[in-house]
Amino acid sequence: MEEKRLFAKKDPVSENMAIDMERIPHHIAIIMDGNGRWAQKRHLPRVAGHKQGMQTVKTITIAASNLGVKVLTLYAFSTENWKRPSSEVNYLMQLPIRFFSTFVPDLVKNNVRVMVMGDIQRLPAKTQQAVNDAVADTANCDGMVLNFALNYGSRDEITRAVQEVAAAVQAGTISPEAIDEELVSQHLMTAPLGEFADPDLLIRTSGEERISNFLLWQLAYSELEFVPEHWPDFDAESLKRAIIEFQGRHRRFGGLKNE
Ligand code: FPP
């Protein structure tokens, strides 16, 4: 089983480097890239990569939960992904249905709560239903939050926040001087995550070094890691390696090292 393998004696990462269980990043966000290339390498259709990528979501969810991560945010579908061929978009819209239809009992068993951010009203009705059901079915879980970014784009998120704040100013409920970083954060889609709204660690798989309209405000002080594996090849050991790398970094938040 994946969680056993994470700490197995033969695990080459754990043999050589120790993970500090006291300093696990609270919020890990992942840009799950490389499904298409993974499939192409195997002469398979692109959607085969997405299907395998869904299995990786299950593996990494359990691994992160076992490590004590508080929030795992996964970029599953961006506001730009609608530009893909409709056959691929349709397949991606089916994935949450498939994922939750088989995996909700495991989520509940592991005390994992599902949350969603993004404009889910634009998703097909059956996809919305599957997502809303999973959110409701796990609402009483108080372990890790599995936060899916679905039809999410950070510029869209910030634009909506600006509209909301502007409307409040126009209505006279707040003055322009009262607008501060805290107030802006409260209008972002990560607000329900409370103290864990900002990721400590962002991982992007597949070697690309871009943020791609993901959590632009929230990543201000996150550690960024770009790893070579395609998402379907990313496993519990890769996650552990990324956390060990994170633990070797010195986060200063703009201050000095010893502050
Ligand atoms: C990027 O790889 C991946 C996506 C746009 C989709 C990510 C979705 C999953 C991993 C499955 C999600 C599962 C659930 C449960 C919602 P790409 O297709 O851009 O890869 P490429 O850059 O190699 O073409």
Image (spheres, rainbow, N blue to C red):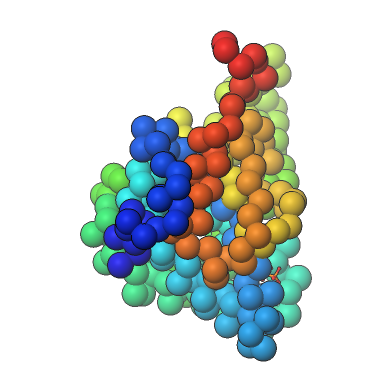
Q: Is residue 58 left or right of residue 36?
A: left
**Placement of 211 over or under 151, stated as above or below:** above
In the rendered image, residue 74, in percent from the top left (x then y), is placed at 53, 55
Q: Is residue 177 visible?
A: yes
- Compared with 193, 103 (above or below) is below
**Residue at left offset 41%, top offset 65%:** 58
Q: Is residue 197 above or below residue 252?
A: below
From the viewer's side, name the closer residue of 23 and 152.
Answer: 23
Q: Nearer the viewer, residue 58 or 24?
A: 24
Q: Position of residue 113 (x, y in %)?
A: 35, 52
Q: Is residue 135 visible?
A: no
Between 170 and 77, the one nearer to me in the picture? 77
Across and down, in percent, residue 97 comes to 44, 74
Residue 59 to residue 118: above or below:
below
Name of the residue lying farthest toward the left: 109
Q: Which residue is at a point 63% across and 46% down the rendered structure image?
A: 225
Screen quadrant of the N terminus: bottom left
**Which x, y percent locates residue 76?**
57, 62
Q: Is residue 213 left or right of residue 248?
A: right
